[in-house]
Image: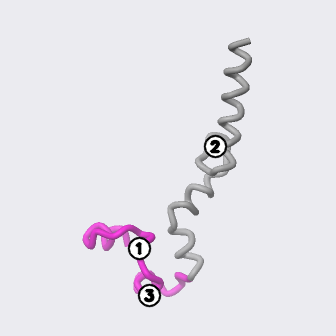
């Protein structure tokens, strides 16, 4: 799939379900969702991860540290 995308100047999330199924019959609508960049970002839901929740928590922690250092 990656080679196909590189050779055809496509991103993985640009592939249709039909094209995905040409690589493997078990690909489904869920595969299309998984390949979206935003889905990948949100999946990184750990300390220091890229999910919106993790980023917000990191910002709050940083603000708290900065406030403590300025007091």
Q: Secondary structure at mark 3?
A: helix
Q: Residues within 10 Å of mark 3 (few under 14, many from 20)?
A: few
Q: Which mark is residue 18?
A: 3
Which of the two labelled residues, at mark 2 and mark 3, occupies the earlier sequence position?
3
Residue 16, above or below 36? below
Q: Residues within 10 Å of mark 1 (few under 14, many from 20)?
A: few
Placement of the C terminus among the 4 image quadrants? top right
Q: Secondary structure at mark 1?
A: helix
Query: Distance from label 1 to label 2 (Cα)?
Result: 27 Å
2 vs 28, left or right, is left
Find out whether the residues at labels 2 and 3 contact each other: C-beta distance under 8 Å. Answer: no
Instruction: Name the residue located 45 percent from the left edge and 70 percent from the top edge.
Output: 13
Q: Nearer the viewer, mark 2 or mark 3?
A: 2
Which of the two labelled residues, at mark 1 and mark 2, occupies the earlier sequence position?
1
Q: Which mark is residue 55?
A: 2
Residue 38, above or below 45? below
First to last magenta residue range: 1-28
Query: Distance from label 3 to label 1 (Cα)?
Result: 12 Å
Residue 10 at what x, y percent from top left? 33, 70
Residue 30 at what x, y percent from top left? 59, 77
Instruction: Name the residue located 28 percent from the left edge and 68 percent from the top edge.
Output: 9
Placement of the N terminus among the 4 image quadrants? bottom left
Q: Which mark is residue 14?
A: 1
Residue 69 at what x, y percent from top left? 69, 14
Q: Nearer the viewer, mark 3 or mark 1?
A: 1
Residue 58, above or below 68? below
Instruction: Name the residue located 70 percent from the left edge and 22 percent from the top edge.
Output: 65
Residue 34 at what x, y percent from top left? 56, 69
- Numbered label tally: 3
Q: Secondary structure at mark 2?
A: helix
């Amino acid at each position: 799939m990656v080679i196909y995308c590189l050779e055809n100047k496509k991103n993985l999330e640009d592939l249709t379900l039909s094209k995905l199924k040409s690589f493997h019959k078990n690909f489904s609508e869920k595969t299309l969702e998984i390949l979206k960049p935003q889905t990948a970002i949100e999946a990184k839901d750990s300390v220091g991860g890229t999910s919106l929740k993790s980023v917000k928590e990191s910002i709050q922690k940083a603000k708290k540290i900065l406030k403590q250092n300025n007091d």
